Amino acid sequence: MRHLLVFILFMVVYEAAAQNYPDTTREFRGVWVATSKRIDYPTVATTDSKVLKQNYLDLLNAWKNAGYNAVIFQVRPAADAFFASEYEPWSEWLTGKQGRPPEPYFDPLEFMVKETHAKGMEYHAWFNPFRAVATIQYADVCKEHISNTNPEWFFTYGANKYFNPGIPEVRNYLIRIIVDVVKRYDIDGVHFDDYFYPYPVTGDNKKIVPLPDEATFKKYGKGFSNIADWRRNNINEFIKECYIAIKNEKPWVKFGVGPAGVWRNKREDPDGSPTNSLSGYDYLYADALTWLKNGWVDYCAPQIYWNIGHVYNDFETVVKWWNNHAYGRNIYIGLGAYNQENPANGWTDPQEIPNQIRITRKYPNVQGVIVYRSTTVAKNPLNMVSSVKQSCFNKNVMMPQMPWLSIFPESPKISMVKMRNQYHVYWQKDNGKTLPPADTAIFYSVYRVKGNNPNFVPSKSNFLKYISQNDLSLFKSKFSFKKKVYTYKITAFNRYHVESQPSRAIIVKYGKKDRVE
């Protein structure tokens, strides 16, 4: 059955607010929202549903106004939940007591996804897969918590308790949690950060305390001569199985990881980066290059939290290394904007973050950024938000494509009519064809050139506006260009942000007697 959608487009040419603005039409602009210990959300732990909802809406408006188009929200900080789960209890960092739901009852994840999509933004559910109890001494752990019902699955290291990644049942359980969320919520992505095996803890003798998993290695480590390779294989298997499980449930849901900024240093591996930092490969047993090479992630967001010109880990040097090791997947750079809240070690420059964003745009495999953290955007240190908005995020952009996930959607069949000084653009959603849900068009892009030019090719230079079903704008001919001719084309995008072939050209002649051809 054919469905007509009506979109009213605001077709006004506007100039960039800053000079030398890079010509960007596709860019991932994410913000990490941490809920562990209420770093970003909620402002205070409460059961009051009204307060929790308004808290999120206030933050969401701030992110949208600052130019961001994606939210990476920590929905499972420590084997708990910011959503209704039959497996794990409500988070103590949401309501103040583990296992206690909001009142009157509502599902925060369902609410957040709906409101985020209403802003035309993506929502990625951020999981900490292996952390179970944070700061054991002070944690509020209910009797139903998995660490109490299955204590054999965990080890204590430092101040925290962790799932043991070497136990196959543990990995299966965690994948079940993730797939449950993918199945029940309309999220756009699943996201992990840099926590896999825990960061090393040093003892009184300043030496690294060994992880307490020797017995697990003896039981499950057959075929591995050393425990480090076995640990990496455990994480590799987990990442691979997560990717497969997510795509089996909903192929359009993206899977991304934000690993440590340094995979390995060159002194440790000839293929490593010219840096001097703790490496994810050697200390967290997270081999991000293997995930990229095998296509087990859709995007990688390395946390490059160093400034431009850092003596050991120069920002651009690390960005360039990741660009050269993308292996066909998308790279989004994690920016340490939080450093500007307490300027030190080179973070006193108000233009640090805008300059970092400009650097990322120099590299073709780097297709966006994610800022840590949400509260920094709200605090606006060194006028960072205004600087980024004016010089980098001053145009609405499309999401980067992931063509390995999808076929091309149908190009829209459009028509345009004028009614009461407004131009209305009509097009068919599916051209009468039945398409898989993931390939149905839900986003659209408008291109325009001057003059009567029906053969023009849509490109960055003639991109006008990117819209979704929830981002409608108004165009009035009174606002238009007297005695001028413009040619328009529209393309369609599916959930993967794969772009269709362009529609037929629409020619609009503005003047006293406006008309459409």
Image (cartoon, rainbow, N blue to C red):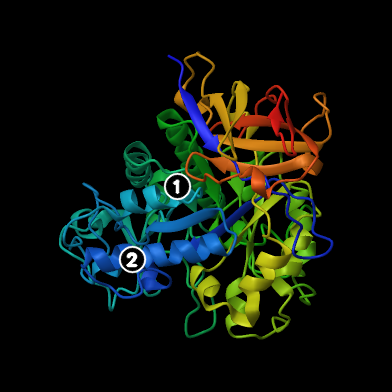
Q: Residue at x 49, y 18 (%)?
A: 435
In the rendered view, does 179 fall on the left or right side of 152? right
Choose between 486 and 435: the one closer to the eye. 486
**Is label 2 in a helix, a strand or a loop?**
helix
Q: Is residue 507 above or below residue 258?
A: above
Q: Quadrant of residue 295?
A: top right
Disc 2 target residue: 54
Is residue 398 something that shows in the picture?
no
Say what amino acid the circle numbered 2 marks.
Answer: Gln
Q: Provide residue 160's location: percent of width, then percent of height.
A: 36, 70
Choose between 176 and 439: the one closer to the eye. 439
N-terminal label among 1 and 2: 2
Q: Is residue 515 above or below residue 172?
A: above
Say what amino acid the circle numbered 1 marks.
Answer: His
Q: Residue at x 54, y 16 (%)?
A: 431
Disc 1 target residue: 117
Q: Is residue 50 above or below residue 72?
A: below
Q: Provide residue 62's location: percent of width, then percent of height.
A: 50, 66
- From this viewpoint, which residue is outermost toward the front? 512
Q: Provide residue 402's location: percent of width, then percent of height.
A: 63, 36
